[in-house]
Image: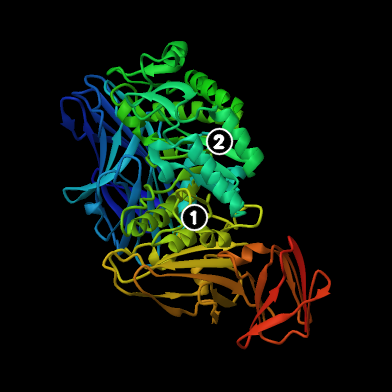
Amino acid sequence: MFLIKNINGKVDIYLNESLVIKDIVPVVNLNHIQIVPELKAFDGNSYIYTDEDMGLTLKLTFDVIDQLILVSINSAVEKDVFAPVGGVILEIGEVKNVREAMALYLFKDWWTRPYFTNNLTELPERTQALTWTDGSIHYGILSVCSGNCKTDFAGKSGKLNAIVSTYDCGHNNYDTLSFVIGADENPYHLVHNMVEIVFSRLKVSGKPREERRLPDVFKYFGWCSWDAFYHDVNEKGIINKAEEFKKSNFPVKWFIIDDGWSEVKDGKLLSFEEDKNKFPSGLQSLSSRLKKEYGLNWLGVWHAFEGYWSGIHPDSLIAKEYKDNIYMTKRGSLLPYPDANKGFGFWNAWHSSLKEKGIDFVKVDNQSSLISFVKNNMDIARAAKGLHNALEASVGLNFEGAIINCMGMATEEVWNRPYSAVSRNSDDFFPKIENSFREHALQNVYNSFIMGHILWGDWDMFWTRHPQGINNAVLRAVSGGPVYISDEVGKTDFSVLWPLVYSDGEVLRCDMPGMPTRDCIYHNPQAEAVPLKIWNKAGQYGVIAAFNINTAGIEVKGTIKPSDVEGIDGEKFVLYEYFSKKIYILDRNQSLDITLQENGVQLYIVSPLNDGFAAIGNENKYISPAVIKSVSVSKEEVNIVCREAGSFGFVSLKEPSQVLVNGKKASVVRRGEVLYSIDCGEEKYSQINIYY
């Protein structure tokens, strides 16, 4: 359990009598002066600081719940106002026994990436999440945006600082749950527990990821217009792409019409209508045609959180008609009103018109640019909460909650989404930048370590005809999130895609967002000669993908072991590598040495070995065991129910005497000593009976 102590007017934090964090001191930046208030009183875990000259009172509360601490700040000043940025800074003198650490920081306004270190005083500005280990216990800090403030972390002058800001002028009160600190022997439990306690104390409708409903559309395969057309997206091009899918009999089930479809002027939204030069038949006609002639179930469109990149055009009809639902900043920018009630009127008007035209979901971009719109107009916490509530109320009413949040990884977005389930998990996929996969994979995997406990991550679109086309497909397969491409017309390699989907277009998904394995959390696979490894689960089976993303292009070496899959049941396992079709039988903690050449990829299925039997699943699919719906194993027989079993692989330490598929005798191909495969044909469901 954590323990808070006052040591000579400074706050220390202990875990089970071991010092973890030393010398926490508040510093206050007012508009005209910086002050270090004096500790006047402390009662249990609350510390009260004052400065009589400025009429300042600051209450610092450490709410301890076993191995979690919620840190809150309540402060008021009478004779000045707080600085918009860093009005309160908690200086942390030292974090003890940091062997390894990984932080996530905003390297652009919208996206986070990992930073690896063992010196927390070097953390970059705008750090939002931090985990570290002393070799046995994992510790974490998550910054929060609540009340009227957001908190970031940064190393400065030999200290780690928690920087608390409203991003607004004129405030003489601070009231915020600033950040959470946690400790656990299990790093994944650590993050989950921190996320769970923050949501419970924020008293918002948002919940951890497993309590958010994933809309059905995102369980199926899709296509996005962005990298195919960029801003030149048009009706004809979209139909041509649909025709390509149809001729290839590939079951794409949704399209997103990305940026470029709407009426805009000077970078600002002009109307709710589509650009008739690009879409002469209109969205309603296009939606109807795509669904009737090309088998799509859903059509989505892109729009920006602020209307368009630079807001709403002041001379537009919508600016006049919805003036009560639109906010004007001090510099004259217009955006949907950052208030749940006022903003809803704008969003509902737009979304209801889109719904009438056959639009089923939206991708909402540019979210973390909100701070640049409202800075010095209103505090960022209130603005973000208001605008997200307004947006999601409309999305719930018009699209049954189907939304992809995008460009929104700042804390004000992360903590203020009431119920939406999906958010982009990295910067863009850049198909024309050589070796950009290395950065894309790095961001997605390490961001997911934190974000995967809050929402389902969208690991972005990709191209199939690409030097890393296979790598991209495998990365999406283990992501657990939506899977979609942005291939240009005539440039889709369907052989890359079939291993991702069932015949009806549903994706063979893993059960949760993919996470870095324990031995990867604190290591930089771009700089070190180690593979990037991601684990996930599909039912009782494990999945481990390994990539070489080293930026020097050198060979990398590492290990794979069944226990890389957290919480997998069993003591003995079969590891099946998708590309080589090789198998390995290992004990739970037994390691397999692996080597990956430049840009190499390996994909392992981890199957428990019970009574000498281990199922592999459909060997033609990346997540092969996802087809298995039930399995029972005894010494005399094995009974399996599968969806689209295809070429069904399994390992048996003793030779079967007979195999039946849907009651009929099936031929079995033996490959090696213990690996077998059964051709189950194209049956939608198969009952497989293996007898000994």
Instruction: State how far apart marks 1 and 2 are (Cα).
Output: 24 Å
The colouring scheme, among rainbow, by chain, secondary structure or one colour, is rainbow
Identity of the residue drawn at 28% across and 64% down: 551
Residue 159 placement, left or right of 175? left
In the image, is 457 to the left or to the right of 366?
A: right
Left of 143 or right of it: where is 85? left
- From the top left corner, tell me how far across and down residue 688 is, in percent: 76, 71
Q: In the picture shown, does residue 236 fall above or below 267? A: below
Q: Is residue 200 visible?
A: no
Residue 84 in view? yes
Quadrant housing residue 297 = top right
Specify the quadrant that holds the C terminus: bottom right
Q: On residue 361, which mark appears?
A: 2
Residue 492: mark in rendering = 1
* Eye-nearest disc, 1 or 2: 1
Q: Amino acid at mark 1?
A: Thr
Please state which of residues 504 and 83 is positioned toward the viewer in this rendering: 504
Expressed as whole percent of the image width and height from the top left, the position of residue 548 reads: 37, 68
Tag 1: Cα neighbours inside 10 Å, few (<14), some, or many (≥20)? many
Q: Is residue 36 above or below residue 489?
A: above
Residue 656 spot, x, y in % from top left: 74, 84
Q: Along the line of sight, which residue is nearer the eye, 43 or 273?
A: 273
In the image shown, does 273 or 341 lie closer to the viewer?
A: 273
- The residue that appears at 46% across and 50% down in the rendered structure is 487
Quarter holding the N terminus is bottom left
Three-letter amino acid code at the position of disc 2: Phe
Q: Nearer the viewer, residue 632 or 623?
A: 623
The total of numbered circles placed on residues is: 2
Q: Secondary structure at mark 1?
A: loop
